[in-house]
Image (cartoon, rainbow, N blue to C red):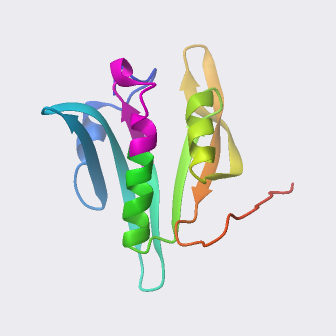
Amino acid sequence: MRDAQPHAWSLDTFQSCLSHPYKAIGLFDHNELQGFYIIHEVTTAEHKEWSLMEIVVNPLQQGQGLGTFLLDDLLSRARRLDVNEIWLEVRTSNHHAIHLYRKTGFVQIDVRKNYYPTDDGREDGLVMCHYPLSTSNRNITILD
């Protein structure tokens, strides 16, 4: 994670996301971790929602489709487990991730102003959502 992101989580934060209600899924090649994602699960009797807390691909392996593979796995699991919504936030400067999220069916819901730290201040975060159980693509527009 530290190699792949400019402002990685602390070790304590990462370790706290390795047990319920979080779930970590790793992608390995010959016992070497190539990428992973972490979800936070909120479930009631009527509704199941995940937050994609983190998705990371080893920088040496980026550009080979592993991010798409991880997202496809996430969405497949979500459909199997009847997850209604998957939420995430992404830096506005992370154009590759935004493209990947949109390509896999995530839609932008909102903008969180000054959400992420940068080396010289802060940047906005896009709030995006995917509806795995939807049989059609939703066209959602947020109006001010």
Residue 45 among magenta residues: no
Residue at 41%, 24% (x, y): give it.
62
Is residue 47 left or right of 38 when viewed as pictured? right
Q: Is residue 55 left or right of residue 27?
A: right
Question: Which residue of the protein is positioned furthest toward the right in this rendering?
Answer: 144
Q: Tell me the quadrant of the picture where the N terminus can be found.
A: top left
Q: Is residue 128 above or below residue 82?
A: above
Q: Is residue 13 left or right of residue 33?
A: right
Residue at far bottom of view: 45
Q: Tell how many labels.
A: 0
Extreme residue in the top direction: 120
Q: Percent from the top left, x then y, of residue 40?
A: 38, 57
Q: Quadrant of residue 65?
A: top left
User: Do we see residue 17 in this rendering?
Assistant: no
Q: Judge by depth and name the residue closer to the eye, 82 or 61.
A: 61
Q: Is residue 63 magenta?
A: yes
Q: Residue at x 66, y 69 (%)?
A: 136
Rendering quarter of residue 61: top left
Please give the range of residues in magenta: 53-69
